[in-house]
């Protein structure tokens, strides 16, 4: 075996039966996140352009939009096989981007469009990524997920590197609104990869393959969540993830708006953070994530993220500066994408199909953005009460310590379920 072959086997820990699906999954996630990370710096800059005092309202508007969209998505999942509803979801977002491009190009009500675009990108990000990981949890077992989700996640990270690189280079000479065309192209490439992945899974016996309709009602995800202590625990984990991210995001928005002047400069700061996160995450996912999950399990992997938040909030409490904000943001997103998020996706490999597409989407989308809205107002109230960024960071420390304990508990629950049966539970049974 040559050195190149050994490196490839180490980077792609798949059996011959799994390799095609793993590579198409990599490509799917690459295109999806490349499109999103072209848009993300533009979204963050528009959030500042609309005024940082409007951010809690934008987070609330995102949550309300998701409350309306979630039942519609549930109906789509119940009535159509995944080979049909997945392309429909992405084509819908492509049509939305085309409308935004026209509005931004014509400079129609720029403040209103900026705020609507901020909400839309926040909704798009969660829906598009949640649909992807539901597909992955449906296709791969717990054991496969521990080996492959790091590599598959590396596809998204590679896309997350390309996206901000495009934004850094082209946002000033072309104008930010023209970057929407690049995002449209990437989304269409993602749809093609999803189609090829569906075909490769259908012909290889090494994968779980059930492309039939999920069935059930549009609100089945809600009932499945409330009757399952395990899923309630995962929902609490996701809510606490939102707590940490929201507290840090609001601190970042206030510090950047006060210390960095100009839309172009602010956009480049956000894109530079994305680029640094991508480089660190890609190296970790390719060479370390799979081994880390297999050796330490999902509990330790999921707990690595709140551990970073404990340290980061202490540092921010002591020194609330732009440099600390940037390092903290890079560190927590690196740990999230490289280690904690693959563990969280493995949590869903041990539940039934309906829970994977409906309860999971409810948790990843509605619970997450509902928590965003709640914690956005919490930050705003604390700030209005006279607390500075350092004091707010110190208040966050006990919460992320509780998150750390929950991670260990969920890891033990997931490992017990996987030991009983690595396949998902039978649809319709309580989880």
Image: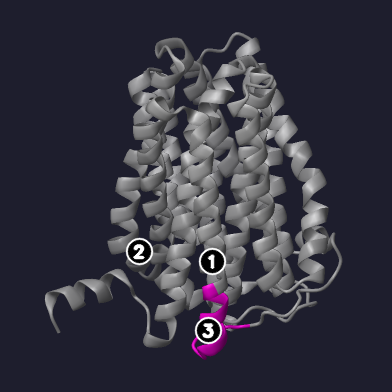
Q: Which mark is drawn over residue 422?
A: none
- Calculate the distance from the C-alpha at mark 3 to the C-alpha at mark 2: 23 Å
Q: Nearer the viewer, mark 1 or mark 3?
A: 1
Q: Is residue 422 above or below residue 323?
A: below
Query: Looking at this view, is 282 or 386 the one in front?
Result: 282
Instruction: State if disc 3 and disc 1 touch (CB < 8 Å).
Output: no
Quadrant including the N terminus: bottom left
The disc, 1 or 3, on the residue closer to the chain's N-terminal end is 1
Q: Which residue is mark 2?
A: 292
* Residue 186 % position (x, y): 49, 53
Residue 361 is situated, as x and y percent measured from the top left of the image, at 69, 57
Identify the mark nearer the N-term, 1 or 2. Answer: 1
The answer to whether residue 154 of the structure is visible from this angle is yes
SS for dot 1: helix
Q: Disc count in the image? A: 3
Under circle 2, the secondary element is: helix
For the residues carrying marks 1 and 2, which lies nearer the camera in this image? 1
Q: Which stretch is magenta? A: 196-209
Neighbourhood count class around disc 2 (C-alpha, 10 Å): few under 14, some 14–19, many 20 upward: many
In the picture, residue 129 is in which quadrant?
bottom right
Residue found at x 52% / y 29%? 44
Q: Where is mark 3, residue-wise?
A: 207
| Residue at the spot of label 1 | 192
Q: Quadrant of residue 268?
A: top left
Q: Mark 3 or mark 2: which is in front?
A: 3
């Amino acid at each position: 075996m040559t050195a190149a072959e050994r490196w490839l086997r180490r980077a792609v820990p798949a059996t011959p039966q799994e390799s095609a699906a793993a590579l198409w999954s990599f490509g799917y996630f690459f295109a999806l996140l490349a499109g999103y990370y072209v848009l993300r710096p533009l979204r963050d800059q528009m959030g500042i352009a609309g005024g940082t005092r409007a951010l809690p309202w934008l987070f609330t508007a995102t949550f309300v939009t998701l409350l309306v969209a979630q039942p519609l998505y549930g109906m789509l999942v119940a009535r159509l096989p995944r080979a049909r509803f997945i392309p429909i979801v992405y084509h819908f977002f492509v049509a939305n981007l085309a409308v935004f491009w026209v509005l931004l190009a014509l400079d129609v009500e720029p403040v209103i469009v900026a705020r609507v675009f901020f909400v839309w990108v926040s909704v798009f990000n969660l829906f598009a990524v949640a649909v992807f990981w539901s597909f992955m949890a449906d296709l791969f077992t717990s054991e496969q997920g521990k080996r492959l989700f790091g590599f598959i996640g590396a596809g998204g990270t590679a896309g997350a590197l390309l996206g901000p690189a495009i934004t850094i280079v082209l946002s000033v000479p072309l104008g930010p609104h023209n970057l929407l065309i690049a995002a449209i192209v990437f989304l269409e490439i993602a749809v093609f990869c999803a189609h090829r992945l569906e075909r490769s899974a259908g012909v290889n016996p090494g994968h779980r393959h059930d492309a039939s309709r999920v069935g059930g009602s549009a609100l089945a995800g809600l009932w499945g969540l409330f009757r399952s202590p395990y899923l309630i625990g995962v929902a609490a984990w996701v809510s606490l993830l939102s707590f940490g991210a929201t507290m840090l995001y609001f601190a970042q928005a206030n510090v950047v708006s006060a210390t960095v002047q100009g839309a172009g400069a602010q956009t480049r700061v956000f894109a530079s953070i994305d680029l640094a996160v991508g480089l660190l995450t890609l190296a970790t996912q390719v060479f370390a994530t799979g081994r880390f999950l297999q050796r330490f399990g999902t509990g330790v992997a999921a707990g690595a993220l709140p551990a970073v938040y404990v340290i980061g909030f202490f540092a921010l409490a002591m020194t609330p500066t732009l440099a600390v904000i940037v390092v903290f943001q890079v560190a927590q997103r690196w740990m999230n994408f490289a280690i904690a998020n693959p563990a969280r996706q493995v949590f869903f490999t041990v539940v039934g199909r309906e829970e994977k597409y409906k309860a999971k989407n409810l948790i990843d989308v509605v619970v997450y953005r509902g928590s965003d809205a709640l914690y956005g107002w919490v930050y705003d109230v604390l700030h209005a009460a006279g607390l500075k960024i350092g004091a707010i960071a110190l208040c966050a420390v006990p919460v992320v310590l509780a998150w750390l304990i929950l991670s260990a508990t969920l890891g033990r629950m997931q490992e017990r379920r996987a030991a009983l049966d690595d396949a998902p539970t039978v649809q319709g049974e309580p989880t």
